[in-house]
Image (cartoon, rainbow, N blue to C red):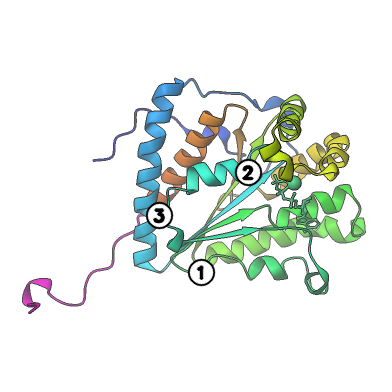
């Protein structure tokens, strides 16, 4: 039925194994193509997204479990285009997308997970987080938005929170879209060069870029501390967009196939029913 040219390719290569003290992102490629041929991968990508759409529909019909995809990246690494390319072909009815911005007044009046938990996907849904609770140990740590004594404890809170979601029926996949600093320059420059992309450019992005090293270190710590068996991080080489799309789609399909989702059995005999 479903046929993948590269079904044997092990997405595990890109998974951060639990228990690492700290990872070095310098050891992870940003422009890998996984040994794939572009034309083949693009053709297979269409098959993968069709399969993903089928799995999503089954999960919706089953109505018992959910999937949460967390996307994190440096500015300009391609979160938006990953969402559009990989998840665009899915049925919007079974999707819930949340883009997390800096928390506003009433959100700041609660603990950092309060607003996040409210957006966790309901049973049957595939939930996408464009940025997430990880900002609370990334930008918050880099910019010192809360005291260290508070953000330090958040890694453990995050692991426990995700374990709670998993125990209650959510499958979690976390992807860090990995690009180099040079690549970010190119992408930000494109936002300046193309009038249709000016709306995407923010001078704040340059201030964040100046803190590249601090962000990178914060990512390295966060990913190492929170990549667990049931809520793994994948480091997705994202400079070849066709490979990035292929890999995220492949991770999604492999993950959802392992869920063994079954369409619900009807509680009636369809043959016995006559529609007049
Ligand atoms: P784009 O790639 O289109 O710029 P974006 O995800 O960067 O998309 P923006 O609206 O530009 O979207 O940025 C959202 C901002 O919100 C980021 O700077 C991010 O760090 C910030 N943010 C998100 N969550 C938190 C948080 N918990 N605390 C502080 N800042 C946060
Ligand atoms: Mg931005």
Hey, which residue is sitting farthest bottom in the picture? 276
In-image side of 272 versus 243 (left or right): left
Q: Quarter holding the C terminus?
A: bottom left
Q: Which residue is mark 3?
A: 259
The answer, for residue 271, to whether it is visible in the render is: yes
Q: Residue at x 38, y 37 (%)?
A: 46
Q: Residue at x 81, y 41 (%)?
A: 205
In-image side of 65 versus 261 (left or right): right
Q: Which residue is mark 2?
A: 79
Image x and y of residue 194, in percent: 69, 33
The answer, for residue 8, to whether it is visible in the render is: no
Residue 272: in magenta span = yes
Q: Would you identify the image quadrant in which residue 129 lies?
A: bottom right
Q: Is mark 3 within 8 Å of ligand 1?
A: no
Query: Total of numbered circles in the picture?
Result: 3
Depth check, front residue: 236 or 199? 199
Mark pair 1, 2: CA separation: 23 Å
Label for residue 122? 1
């Amino acid at each position: 039925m479903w046929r993948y040219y590269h079904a044997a390719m092990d997405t595990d290569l890109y998974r951060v194994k639990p228990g690492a003290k700290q990872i070095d992102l310098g050891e992870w490629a940003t422009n890998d193509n996984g040994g794939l041929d572009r034309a083949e991968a693009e053709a297979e990508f269409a098959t993968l997204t069709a399969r993903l759409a089928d799995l999503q529909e089954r999960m919706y019909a089953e109505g018992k479990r959910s999937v949460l995809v967390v996307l994190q990246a440096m500015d300009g690494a391609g979160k938006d285009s990953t969402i559009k390319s990989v998840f665009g072909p899915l049925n919007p009815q079974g999707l819930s997308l949340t883009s997390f911005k800096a928390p506003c007044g009433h959100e700041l009046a609660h603990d950092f997970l309060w607003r996040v938990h409210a957006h966790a996907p309901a049973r049957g849904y595939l939930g996408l987080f464009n940025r997430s609770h990880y900002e609370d140990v990334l930008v918050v740590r880099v910019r010192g938005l809360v005291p260290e004594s508070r953000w330090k404890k958040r890694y453990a809170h995050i692991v426990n929170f995700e374990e709670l979601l998993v125990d209650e029926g959510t499958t979690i996949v976390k992807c860090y879209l990995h690009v180099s600093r040079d690549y970010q320059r190119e992408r930000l420059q494109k936002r300046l060069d193309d009038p249709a992309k000016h709306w995407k450019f923010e001078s704040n992005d340059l201030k964040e870029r100046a803190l590249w090293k601090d962000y990178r270190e914060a990512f390295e710590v966060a990913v190492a501390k929170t990549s667990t068996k049931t809520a793994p991080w994948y480091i997705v080489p994202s400079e070849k967009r066709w490979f990035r799309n292929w890999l995220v789609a492949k991770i999604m399909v492999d993950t959802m196939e392992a869920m063994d989702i079954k369409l619900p059995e009807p509680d009636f005999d369809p043959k016995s029913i006559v529609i007049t």
